[in-house]
Image: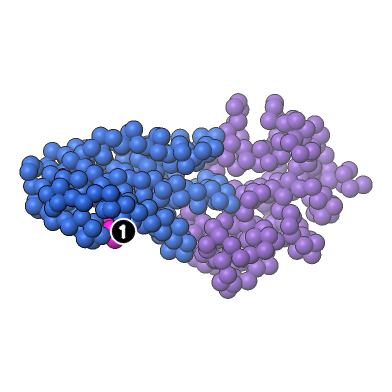
Chain colours: A blue, B purple
Amino acid sequence: MNHSIARLTWVNVRKDLRLEWRSRDVLNSMLFFALLVVVIFSFAFDPSVEESRRMAGGLFWTAFLFSTVMALNQSWARELRNGVLDAYRVSPSPSEALFLGKVIGNFLLVLLLECLMAPLFVIFYNLSSVGPVWQLGVVFLLGTWALVVNGTFFAAMSIRTRNRELMLPLLLLPISIPAVASMVLATTNVLTGESSPVLQMKFLAVYCVVFTTACFLLFDTVLNAE
Amino acid sequence: MRGLSLELEQGRFYVLRGENGAGKSTLLRMIAGLNEPTEGHIFIYGIKNKEALEHIGYMAHAPLLYEEFSAMENLRFFAQLYGISSDQPLIQALERVGLDPKLERRVGQYSQGMRQRLSLARAIFHSPRLLLLDEPFSNVDPDSAAAIAKLLAGMRDEGKTIVLVTHQIGLLSSVADEYILLSHGQLVERGAMQRVTA
């Protein structure tokens, strides 16, 4: 990777995290939403330990998928306020650095949310994993990256549309179905220990590489589209 | 814009005039590379405008600033995009527009006039050779506006080219060199500034 892109990516990550630290817009809304999902589902169902293991994968990823959508909308809205995105566009900084910076910033925030929510899931659903827990870590890293990289790209695509909050899920969810299905299946496989999640993990890795490359290459066109 | 052909000289101060919707802001955005012309090209010092971005300073209607950051934090972020790591040019830019570099208040708490001045500092900190300014005097008190006009004249004297959109033409009567009048996206008149103010 070009040294300048790496340096400017880091500049953008630091800026995004500092803005989030000051406002806490994204983290608060994500946390609130994910917490609602956990609490509502825990009241709606009263699963046994075995049933919890089977449904937790779906619950996890439903909560994180929709929380991520909220985060992504907010992170670009910040760039539109006061037209700051134009200041970036008139600078000689490559647009790829902005994209990667946003992806990494959003990835870290969603990971933080997952770390905060995981203990709650364990408590509310009385969860314990039969398979190795490190595999869950890999699934969460790959799954979160898959959601965030596509989400950041499609959020950028929808920022100039009138109903951008509606547009993002319409664009993101269909393209995320294969990844979400793999995440859910892999998580369930690890929790129940009934079969190996390696195939789904490989699929997620390939998905991440393909979509990261495609989004990286197309971002400049999306950013400068009028 | 329609059929516009325009050549600007280095070290001159131009004022873009015209009624609302004449295309003044669009022209500035095109020169800055924010809008693409459907036909034709824009060259800045012989280079295509998109490849000459480090030579351009752009100030828009909106302040183009993060409200959660202080003045210095905003400038530091944008400076890094231009490969500038020293605070010195940022402090100088803030002082030139009459803002205190030590001010720690966040931009969200600034008055409109202060935002406007900070926005100008953001446009000039990297010493651009071409400065594009869209209504830099709006929301600025008369004394500050006169000071900004004087600052811009000084930058013109340093050899920088300035293209400015304003409706407050009187402020620039003694400092600008030429006016360019646009109407419905077309250039209709161009001449010495004295002709407007005479």
Tell me where residue B100 appears, x and y as whole percent.
Answer: 63, 71
For residue A9: magenta? no
Residue occupying image coordinates x 68% and y 30%? B1
* A168 over A36 or under it: above or below: above
Q: Is residue B196 visible?
A: yes
Q: Is residue A218 visible?
A: no
Tell me where residue A18 appears, x and y as whole percent.
Answer: 43, 62
A8 on left or right of B158: left
Tell me where residue A205 appears, x and y as whole percent.
Answer: 21, 41
Number of labels in the image equals 1
Q: Is label 1 in a helix, a strand or a loop? A: helix
Nearer to us in this view, B41 or A118: A118
A142 on left or right of B149: left
* Magenta segment: A114-118
Give the overall secondary structure of the magenta segment: helix
Quarter of the view holding residue A155: top left
If the image is split into quadrants, where does the C terminus of chain A sit?
top right
B158 on left or right of B182: left
Identify the residue position indicated by label 1 in the image: A112
* A36 over A143 or under it: above or below: below
Residue occupying image coordinates x 71% and y 36%? B23
The chain containing the residue under callout 1 comes to: A
Nearer to us in this view, B6 or B143: B143
For residue A116: magenta? yes
A63 on left or right of B127: left
| Residue type highlighted by circle 1 | Leu
- Pointer 1: residues within 10 angstroms few (<14), some, or many (20+)? some
Nearer to us in this view, A75 or B74: A75
* B181 over A108 or under it: above or below: above
Tell me where residue B184 appears, x and y as whole percent.
Answer: 75, 30
